[in-house]
Image (cartoon, rainbow, N blue to C red):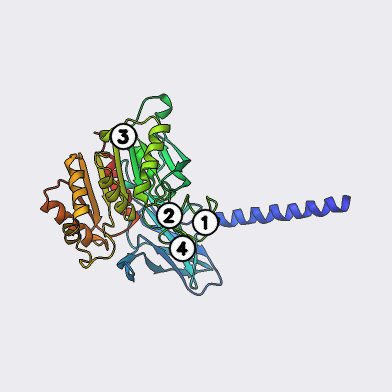
């Protein structure tokens, strides 16, 4: 027995020593390091590597062909080796923003072992860091600041329309526990995402916390649903098990009983029953990115008079296969049912119909021709255009702008 205890003690000592060595070794490499001149240096200890690159959204974009058309992807840069440590310093100072990156070592993607901050986008993990120069800039807005914080909860609800129990993420503002009723923003993710996308990639809680603290946004409840009708929750969080996420965020071949927009009434019914909600369209907003932009477009016209504030972020408005291709104006003009739904929606005089997209977004043409349809029918809307394309950098900006316009 004494011998066994001695062996166990040795094993524990060895484990502790290894852990301490790993901890101290990790502290020797600082990455990323934000330099006094605003540039950023990345480092990786890889003494046996032949070629190491850093890939990130702060580097010049590359273009790739996808089934959805030409899209921009993150650029990459070669790192230099010295004494087994590879490094790269950006050529210029980075502007305030949340940035993502990862390393590629001899053809194998690798996260930065010196940076514990990372997030998942569909099947890819990336490291993140934030640049901020002054209060109120983008980086500051995405930072956890010393302000009152709201709560973020994962909630299971019944969906009679889909015949399942599903999960959504709900943010309540810092003053929610004090009582009172609040307006509601329904915030929808894009293809490949789930109810975790906006909290993790979109910095939803940080943006809304900071805007409320600055007096730029009204305290609000934010509801983030899973927009994949054949999934009950994020991958690994429901009975389907640890399947590999896909671009469309669902199990291949799985069929849902109804569409996301048809089942959205179940979400709204649950929220209005279980949360202290200010009801009526003047207290209800909906917005979403890409696929979530399509869902926003579809839900708002399916339930006219429900939402006073509607936001389409890089929206995929394409209505399936059509001889008109990306010409949404031609599609809608030829579709009597959808045209009638949109007419009914705008007859309710929503206070804000907001369209936002980047200049190089692959959905730019769809949004341009959709705006032509709105113009031709004299349907009022606001348009907000940014640089770059179909990226979270833009969608965080759009949420920040939209949140300041609603419930005023």
- Mark positioned earlier in the residue sequence (3 or 2): 3
| Closer to the eye: label 3 or 1 | 3
Residue 252's disc is 4
- How far apart marks 3 and 2 lie (CA) works out to 42 Å
Q: Are marks 3 and 1 in contact (CB under 8 Å)?
A: no
| Closer to the eye: label 3 or 2 | 2
Residue 4's disc is none
Q: Position of residue 189 (x, y in %)?
A: 37, 51
Residue 214's disc is 3
- How far apart marks 2 and 4 lie (CA) works out to 12 Å
- How far apart marks 4 and 3 lie (CA) works out to 44 Å
Query: In the depicted view, which residue is nearer to us: 295 or 74?
Result: 295
- Mark positioned earlier in the residue sequence (1 or 2): 1
| Closer to the eye: label 4 or 3 | 4
Q: Secondary structure at mark 1?
A: loop
Residue that appears at 28% across and 50% down: 298
Q: Secondary structure at mark 4?
A: loop
- On the image, which quarter does residue 387 sit in? bottom left
Q: Which residue is mark 2?
A: 256
Query: In the depicted view, which residue is nearer to us: 224 or 133?
Result: 224
- Classed neighbour count for the residue bearing mark 3: other residues with Cα under 10 Å, few (<14), some (14–19), many (≥20): few
Say whether residue 240 is left or right of residue 173. right
Residue that appears at 32% across and 30% down: 278
């Amino acid at each position: 027995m004494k011998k066994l205890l001695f062996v166990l003690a040795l094993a524990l000592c060895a484990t502790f020593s290894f852990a301490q060595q790993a901890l101290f070794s990790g502290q020797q490499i600082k990455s990323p390091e934000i330099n006094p001149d605003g540039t950023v240096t990345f480092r990786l200890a890889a003494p046996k590597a032949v070629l190491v690159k850093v890939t990130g959204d702060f580097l010049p974009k590359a273009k790739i062909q996808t089934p959805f058309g030409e899209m921009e992807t993150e650029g990459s840069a070669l790192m230099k080796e010295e004494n087994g440590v590879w490094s790269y310093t950006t050529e210029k100072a980075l502007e305030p923003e949340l940035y993502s990156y990862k390393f590629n070592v001899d053809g194998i993607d690798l996260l930065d072992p010196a940076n514990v901050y990372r997030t998942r986008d569909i099947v890819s993990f990336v490291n993140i860091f934030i640049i901020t120069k002054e209060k109120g800039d983008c980086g500051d807005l995405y930072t956890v600041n010393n302000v009152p914080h709201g709560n973020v909860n994962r909630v299971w609800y019944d969906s009679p329309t889909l015949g399942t129990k599903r999960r959504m993420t709900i943010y309540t503002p810092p003053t929610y526990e004090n009582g009172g009723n609040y307006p509601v923003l329904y915030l929808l993710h894009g293809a490949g995402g789930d109810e975790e996308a906006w909290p993790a990639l979109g910095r939803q809680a940080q943006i809304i916390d900071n805007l409320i603290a600055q007096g730029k946004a009204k305290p609000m409840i934010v509801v983030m649903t899973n927009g994949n009708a054949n999934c009950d929750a994020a991958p690994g969080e429901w009975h389907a098990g640890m399947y590999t996420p896909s671009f469309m965020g669902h199990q291949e071949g799985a069929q849902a009983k109804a569409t996301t927009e048809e089942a959205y009434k179940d979400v709204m019914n649950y929220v209005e029953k279980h949360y202290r909600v200010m009801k009526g369209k003047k207290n209800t907003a909906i917005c979403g990115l890409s696929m979530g932009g399509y869902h926003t477009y579809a839900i708002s016209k399916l339930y006219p008079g429900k939402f006073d504030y509607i936001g389409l972020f890089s929206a995929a408005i394409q209505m399936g296969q059509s001889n008109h291709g990306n010409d949404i104006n031609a599609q809608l003009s030829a579709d009597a049912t959808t045209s009638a739904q949109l007419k009914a929606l705008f007859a309710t005089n929503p206070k804000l119909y907001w369209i936002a997209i980047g200049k190089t977004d692959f959905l730019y043409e769809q949004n341009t021709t959709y705006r032509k349809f709105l113009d031709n029918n004299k349907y009022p809307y606001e348009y907000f255009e940014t640089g770059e394309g179909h990226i979270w950098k833009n969608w965080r900006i759009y949420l920040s702008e939209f949140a300041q316009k609603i419930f005023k």
